[in-house]
Image (tube, grey):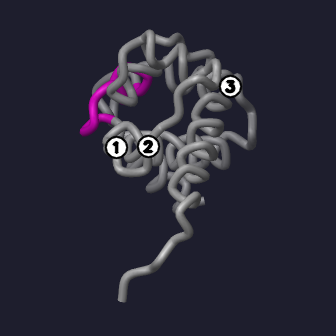
Amino acid sequence: MATVHPVGAAADQGRVLSEAIVRIAGCWKLTNEQLGAILGLSPATASRLRSGSFQLERSSKPFELGQYLVRLFRSLDALMGSDDGASISWLRTANLDLDGRPIELIRTVRGLSDVADYVDDHRAQI
């Protein structure tokens, strides 16, 4: 049975996810170019997202990618004990298991999924 959401629910989801992504970008010191690449947006649109003049739409691919980004952030944050500096360092350091630097790998859909899965797997072992 399908779930019925109020008319404004999709807009609220877009607003909440957009705000979460802006916070993640700030914590991880992502440039607009990096954020745009991760979400499949232009750097200009990523800039508008940061300023609040653009929000992700529930039915869009950037929304789906944003959900993966939040998943990765939450898992990495838990693994690193909420130490943003440690998370940034991990993202920017070459990882032999992933065969690359996670910050570069998450620029593709496959890379974002692989990195999120990798962090989730390590988090599950703790």
Which of the labelled discs sits on residue 27, or is there none? 3
Is 7 covered by the magenta stretch? no
Q: Measured from the top left, where is residue 122 in percent x and y? A: 49, 52
Q: Is residue 118 visible?
A: no
Residue 111 shown left or right of residue 89 in the figure: left
Read off the magenta span.
Answer: 102-111
Mark 2: secondary structure? loop
Q: Are marks 3 and 1 in contact (CB under 8 Å)?
A: no
**Residue located at (65% from left, 36% from top):** 19
Q: Earlier in the sequence, mark 3 or mark 1?
A: 3
Viewer-closest of 64 and 9:
9
Residue 55 shown left or right of residue 60 in the figure: right
Amino acid type of the residue tagged 1 in the rendering: Ser
**Residue located at (62% from left, 16% from top):** 29
**Residue located at (28% from left, 29% from top):** 108
Which residue in the protein does label 2 denote? 57
Q: Measured from the top left, where is residue 83 in percent x and y? A: 74, 33
